[in-house]
Each structure stands twice: as structure tokens, then as C-alpha cells.
Image: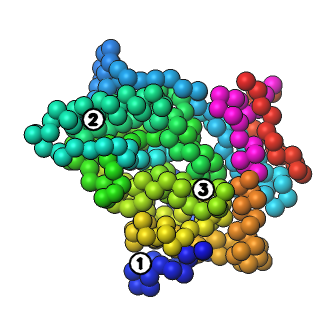
Amino acid sequence: MVAGDTIPRGSVRVSPIPPRLPGPPPEAAASRPEIWLVEERSGSEAYSHGLRIDTRFAVSNWKRSYPVFSHDGWQDNTWRLHTATEPVGIVYHTTESHLAPFDRHHNGRLRRLGRWLLEYVAKQKAYHFLIDRFGRVYRVVEETDAANHAGHSVWADQAGLYVNLNSSFLGVAFEAQSEPAAALTPAQISAGRQLTELLRSKYGIRPENCLTHAQVSVAPSMRRVGNHLDWGESFPFEDIGLPDNYAQPLAAIHRFGFRYTAEFLEVTGPRFWKGLLLGDELLRQDAAAVGLGPGEYRNQLQGKYRKMVAALPKPGERLVEETDGSEEQDFQGNEHEARRKQ
């Protein structure tokens, strides 16, 4: 069931949007504070804005290398990809782990649960960073490596299209649960803001590429958004120092042709619905621009998504042979399987 018309009327106010939203203006480097490593000791790092990262439990995984797909060339199969090795965004998660009441009478249990959780996510190589209930920041997977945090997922920005974000996006998990709606401690919010500032400063990450797992997760077999639902509502974007990114058009809809259901609406909320409605509207605009109905255009987008999935390397594989010093690969006709090398 496509739920584009099932959002309750009047529950969301969305301003009219012009045909094909322009990209965000270039972000001046001066708008991001300069943050540097002050001190590095065995097991910890201290940064100039006050953040401390515990590195004692950090583990390695396969090195980050991922494809960035072009926006154009899909009609005539001349689309392109190039490889990248720096993260372009952040995905925020909840751990969905056991929680104890946050008070001094449960301090011992809080500490034990946090330690068990840290050991588990390190074993699973599940995130790049974990923020526990006390606001302590732990590095889980090394920043140079991919982490197993996003699964089937998609996003798009002005630079290109991204599929399966384990490499292209950093995973930041808060020790929290989605149900009831996640409530972070003040220490977690403060630490989340500092960590976001650090990662944005270090990698030049744009604010609109800082997203929740629910915004990027997809279920390919069902052609639906929201295979994972953590932070489907109530993520404190503003407290973390970001705009309300729930209001962004959902790329899974207008760039990849995924749908959403009434059940998905029940577990999200009006803030999230804005992005769904804008995604629907952009899909209709793009379909009209090429003379197609929304359904036919959605099918084309899904075919495009399948081509991208077919071109993905296996973990640890490189996408192209760098014989000419270039990391770009062009595709013609039906050839959409990237050359791979270990």
C-alpha cells in the first residue's frame, strides 16, 4: 500500500516547493569551528572543544572504499561512478539495548549494562562511535574503516548517489531505545553535539548529510523505506547543532523509487512526514519532466537502484583497477558490473 495520501490532512505544513529543489549553497569552511587533537594517550584522545574519546576498545574492519554514483546518464546507460575513501555523512542510531533507570541507585547496573553493550558492539563491529548513558564517547570501529551499521540504505546529495552506507557514512549510536520514544540524557546530548562538531570539522561533512537510520534504511525486497526504524521520530537535531533534517525530502523516495506504508507512518511522526511528502512531490515533478507517470517513473528509479547494487564491491574489494591513475569508471549499454580487484 502506497501511503502518500494517507498522511492526515492538516497534520503537516509543507511550503510549496519549486520544480526540482536547488542544492544547498556551498558551506563556508569558516562556518565550522576549527577543532584539533590536543592530546593523545594510550586509550584516549582529547580535543580542543572539550570532547574526550575513549579508544581502548577500538577494533579494525575492512578499509573504507565506496562508490559514488552519478546523477545523470541513467536514461541511456552512460552513468558513472568513482570511488571515495572519506566519509560524507553521519547516521545516528539507537542501540535498542537493555536500559536501567537513570538514577544513582542504579549506578552499578548502568555501568554493567554499558560495559556489556560496548563489548558486544565492538565484537559485531557495529558502529564507529558509541555514546553511553553517562555521555562517554567510545570509538568502536576505526574511522578509516567501514562499520556494520547501516545495512540496506540509500542517500543522495549534490555530489552523487550512495548505496549501502556502511562505508560512506559514519555510524554514531546512542545507548537508547526507540520504544518508548528515545530520551537521551543531557550528557548524551552534549557529547553527541561535540562528536558531531568534531566529525563535521574533520571531514567537511555538510549538515544535511547528518541523518537518522530511519531516514536512510530501505527494504529492497519489498521496495519500501524504513527497514530499520531507529530515530524515526524525536531525534534532537537542533540540540545536536543541526537543522531539522526530518524536513528534507527523503532521497529513498525521489531518487531511488522506494515507497512507504501506513504502518511506517504509525511508527514515525509529523516531523518525519514532511520529508515523505516532499519526496513524493519531487518524484512527481521529475516524472512529469520526462513525460512519465509517477508509477512508471518509480519503476525506472528502482531499475536504476538495482544497477547500482549490482556494481557494489564486496567488503574489502576495490572497485576499479587504477592503471591510469583515475578512479572513475564509465558504463555503456548493459555493462553495469564494476571491475573489481582485491
**Quadrant of the frame with the N terminus:** bottom right
Image point (69%, 34%), residue name: 314
Q: Is residue 135 above or below residue 3?
A: above
Magenta residues, start to end: 307-323
In terms of depth relative to the viewer, which is nearer, 175 or 35? 175
In terms of depth relative to the viewer, which is nearer, 133 or 284? 133
| Helix, strand or loop under label 3 | strand
Query: On the picture, is 137 further left or further right than 337?
Result: left
In terms of depth relative to the viewer, which is nearer, 63 or 83? 63
Its colouring scheme is: rainbow
Alpha carbons under labels 2 and 3: distance apart: 31 Å
Image point (67%, 41%), residue name: 67
Find residue 12 and name its label.
1
Check disc 1 and give the amino acid type. Answer: Val
| Helix, strand or loop under label 2 | helix
Magenta part, dominant SS: loop
Find residue 113 and name its label.
2
Q: Earlier in the sequence, mark 2 or mark 3?
A: 2
Query: On the picture, is 108 further left or further right than 8?
Result: left
- Whether residues under marks 1 and 3 lie with C-beta atoms below 8 angstroms apart, the answer is no
Quadrant of residue 99 in the image? top left
Query: On the picture, is 273 further left or further right than 250?
Result: left
Alpha carbons under labels 1 and 2: distance apart: 39 Å
Quadrant of residue 218 in the image? bottom right
